[in-house]
Image (cartoon, rainbow, N blue to C red):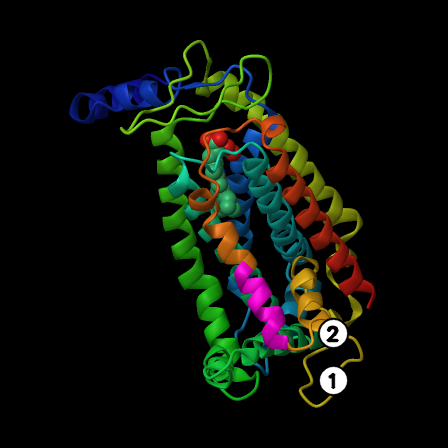
Amino acid sequence: MKLMQSLVDWVDVRLGVRQIWIANSSDYLVPRNINKWYSLGTVLLVLFGLQFVTGILLLIHYVPDVEKAFASVERIVNVVPFGWLIRSLHAVGSNLIVVVLLLHMLSVLFMGSYKRPRELTWLSGFGLFNLGLILCLTGYLLPWSQLSFWATTVATDAAGALPVIGAELVEFLRGAPSVGPQTLGRFFALHVVVLPFALVGLIGFHLFCVRRNGISTPPFGPDARPAKVGGFFEHEKNPGGIPFFPNYTLEEMGVVCFFLALLVAVTFFAPQIFVPYSALEPADPFTTPEHIKPEWYFLWAYQTLKIFPSKLMGLVVQIGLMTFLALLPFIDRGAERRPIKRPIFVTVYVLILLVMIGLSIWGHYS
Ligand code: HEM
C-alpha cells in the first residue's frame, strides 16, 4: 500500500494525475434526479469489454478457413475446457449488446438528449450503433454453419437491389460472385481487427463528447426546463448534483449487475434461443434450407424488403429512415426536451416503434 502511495506521488509530481482524477470523479457532478436509463452507456462499456475478452479467447482456437472453421468451433464447444461457456457468453453477449444499444438510443430519443449541444454525441452514438450491427453481421458468418452461410447470402443479396452499383456492390461485399472463402477472409478481418479498432476509437470520441458537455438534466419533474441553448460552448455543470465517483458509479453498478445477471442466466439456462438447429450443421452451398431468417434485430428490415412491390423500394425506405435518424438533431431543432411538451414527437416515436416491432414479429412468423 505504502509502495503504491509512493508510486502515485512520484507520477503526480510529474503529471498532476490527482488533479485529473478529482476533476473527473468527486468534482464531476451528475444531476441529482438522474435516472436508471443513464446507466445504459456504462452497461454497454462493460458488455463490449466482455466481448473483447471472450473474443480473444475464442481466437486462440478458431480457424478462419472454410474447410476448418465449423470443426474448430465444434472443438471449442466440445473439447476445449470451458470453451462452451466462452462461446455462449460471446454469442449471447452480442445479442444483449443490441438490446442495450436499442434501449440506450430509445431513452436518449425520449429524453431529447440528442438535441443541441449534443449533436456530435448523437452522431458518434449513431455510428457506434451501426458499427455494433456490422460487428454482429460479420461475426455471424465465422462459424461457417448453414445458418451463417445462408443468412450472409441473403443479407449481402439485399445490396443487389440498388440500381447501377447493386451487382458490383454485392460482389465487393462478398469478395466473389457468391459467399465463399473470400467472404470468410474479409469478414474475419473486419470482425477481429478493423471494426474493433474503429469501435474503440469512436467510443473514445463519444465519451469525450459526453464528458465535455456534462450529463444532461433529465427532462422530468417540477424543475424540468427546456435546454439552455446558447451561442457559446458551455459545460452543463449540474450544481448541487451527486459526485460521479463513488456515489453515482456505485448506483450504476446495480444496473450493470442486472444486465450481467441476465447474460449469465440466458447463457446457462437458454443459450439455444440464439443457436437454432441450422447453426449446428456445417455450411452447404448446394442445399438451401427451407426458411432462412436473419437475426431478430434485422427482421424488420428483412420484412420491409418483402412487403414492398420491389426490393429497391424497401431499401429506399430503410435508408431513408436511417438517414432521418442520423440527422434528427438537425431536423428537430427546438430546445424543448420534456416529453410531455413534445406530443407530436412522442406520437411518431411510439408509432414507429410499434411498426418496427410489428414488422419484426411478422418477419419472424412469415
Ligand atoms: C458502443 C456503444 C455506446 C457506448 C459505449 C455509449 C456510452 C455512453 C455513455 C457512458 C454515456 C453517458 C451516460 C449515459 O447517458 O448513458 C452516453 C451518453 C449518450 N449517448 Fe451513448 N453509448 C453508445 C452508443 C450510443 C448510441 C447508439 C447512441 C444514439 C444513437 C448514443 C447517444 C448518446 C447520447 C446523445 C448521450 C448523451 C446523454 C446525456 O447526456 O443525457 N450512444 N453514451
Extent of the magenta region: 311-320
**SS class, disc 2:** loop
In the displayed image of the protein, which residue is found farthest to the top? 240
In the displayed image of the protein, which residue is found farthest to the left? 14
**SS class, disc 1:** loop
Position in image of residue 281 (x %, y %): 74, 76
Amino acid type indicated by mark 2: Ile
Position in image of residue 343 (x %, y %): 63, 34
Task: Between residue 68 and residue 96, name the one nearer to us.
Answer: 96
Mark 2 Cβ inside 8 Å of ligand 1: no
* Residue 244 horizontal side relative to residue 89, left or right: left
Count of numbered marks: 2
Q: Main secondary structure of the magenta part?
A: helix
Label 1 CA crowd tier, 10 Å (few <14, some 14–19, many 20+): few
* Residue 93 horizontal side relative to residue 24, left or right: right
- Circles 1 and 2, Cβ within 8 Å, touching? The answer is yes
Amino acid type indicated by mark 1: Thr
Q: Which mark is residue 11?
A: none
Q: CA distance from mark 1 to mark 2?
A: 8 Å
Determine the residue positioned at 36% across, 43% down.
Answer: 205
Residue that badge 2 annotates: 292
Determine the residue positioned at 39% across, 56% down.
Answer: 198
Residue that badge 1 annotates: 288
Label 2 CA crowd tier, 10 Å (few <14, some 14–19, many 20+): some
Whether residue 57 is visible to the viewer of this picture, yes or no, is no
Asked which quadrant contains residue 116, the reply is top left
Q: Is residue 357 above or below residue 32?
A: below
Question: Does the magenta run of residues contain 340?
Answer: no
Determine the residue positioned at 70% across, 90% down.
Answer: 286
Mark 1 Cβ inside 8 Å of ligand 1: no
